[in-house]
Amino acid sequence: MIRTVADLLSGILRDELPKLDSSPIKHAPTIGDMYEGLSSELLHRALPDGLGIQVVSGFARDGRGRLSGQLDCMIVRGEGEQVRHTDSFVWHVKDIIAVIEVKKRLHSAELRDAFAQLRTVSEIEHSYYQGDEEQSDDPDRSLEPSVRTFAEMTGLLAWDSQGPIALPYEEEALFHALALEQVSAIRVILGMHGFKSERAFRASMIDYLEQNVGRAGFGPTYFPQLIISGGYSLVKANGRPFMAPLVNGWWPFYFSTPENPLRLLLEFIWTRLDEMYGFGQQLWGEDLETEVGRTLLSFRAMCGEGRKGWEVQAHQVDDETLDGLPATEQWSPEFIGLEEHVILLMLCRGREVRCDDPDILSWLESRGVAIDDVRDRLLGTRLVASSGERLKLIAKECGLAMLPTGEYVAAENSTGRLDRWISRRIKGLREDASDEDRV
């Protein structure tokens, strides 16, 4: 479904954008209104009916009267306050789902301007969610999604039935960043036109960051979740929906892609709505193709010499390498061994599994398999995390299967993705068998 809607919106954009581009109007505010109006229309069409969600323009606020800069488009729920004698609204940050800054063309100057504008929203959110105003009984503020994302990224548990688990500063900072990402508004910069190459877009962001390294407002939670410049996008891997496991302690935080930008926008918005309202499987369609991200920025929390903060790495890639990378790839579950299958089955049935369990150790020894190897392979599935010697299932719905080939597979199956993959795989095996019979 998400691809169908993205294709529909792309068709509207292809039809309407040339009309706006060729307009004889030269009045800059009116031109801005035209592109913002087109963006609002696309967003209206992208939102499911019956949720009471609106698309407005105006300002974000907190409970202390602080206001953001003027915002082009906000996807909101609940009620806001209309600014007298205007079409603009003031909306509390807790009820803002997404904020979109619209640019006719997004190049370096516009990127900096829009980034700064969205940072005014981030500053209000940080103050609100990290202060005393936040209502702990808000049903939308369960940290379970952030706990799961952290476990997928690190293989470690940040929370258990007893509450938060003590973590080193570096991992605690990462978890807090993911939690803030979960509750904050999705921030998007939407440039209708922009950079002619993906490499130039990446270079502009790196240059902007290098000019501001060490300054407040440039940590990972201040970066927009999505920046679109024509046919290229910069995307945040914060687990909602895109996730990247740590690499030697570094968080591959931002990646670039030439994939359909409207599909990426829908992925972010619909993931948030699914977390809030629970749409289920029908929202995602087949979902058997995934984006191939080209890492741009990596962050790592650091603590030393009396200082705490974030280190950043920029990843330079030339045009030839970028052009040689696919934009998407076919999704596949994890292929596992019998040992991992058995332990996952135990976890799915609610059994406690410990890596120092004598019975498990004896069984693995009889098979000539080391527990450390099994543990590493289980953590590599991103379905399991650990705390000390204990293993815990972190998947919302862990799917397990043995294929007709005798292979074992495992995957998150809350959207039915594994079921669809198995159906396609079995169909392919049958077709291969029929071809061999004909030969």
Image: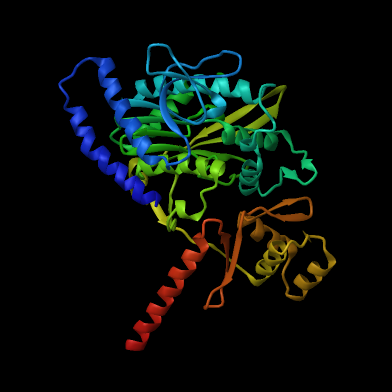
- Residue 96 lies, in percent from the top left, at 51, 28
Q: Position of residue 305 (x, y in %)?
A: 71, 23
Q: Is residue 13 left or right of residue 421?
A: left
* Relative vertical location of residue 33 with respect to residue 324 in this rendering, above or below: above
Observer able to see residue 106? no
In the picture shown, does residue 159 fall above or below 383? above
Residue occupying the point 17% across, 24% down = 23
Residue found 71% across the figure and 62% down from its top:
347
Which residue does the image show at 82% across and 63% down from the upper left? Answer: 357
- Indicate left or right for 25 with 120 as reference: left
Residue 268 in picture, x, y percent from top left: 47, 40
> At 58% from the left edge and 33% from the top edge, which residue is drawn?
183
Q: Can residue 230 be spotted in the picture?
A: yes
| Snapshot quadrant of residue 232 | top left
Query: Is residue 20 shown left or right of residue 111?
Result: left
| Residue placed most toward the observer, 335 or 84 | 84
Which quarter shows the C terminus? bottom left
Query: In terms of image quadrants, where is residue 9?
Result: top left
Residue 175 is left or right of residue 17, and the answer is right
Q: How is the image coloured?
A: rainbow
- Image quadrant assignment for residue 102: top left
Along the line of sight, the residue nearer the viewer: 145 or 261: 145
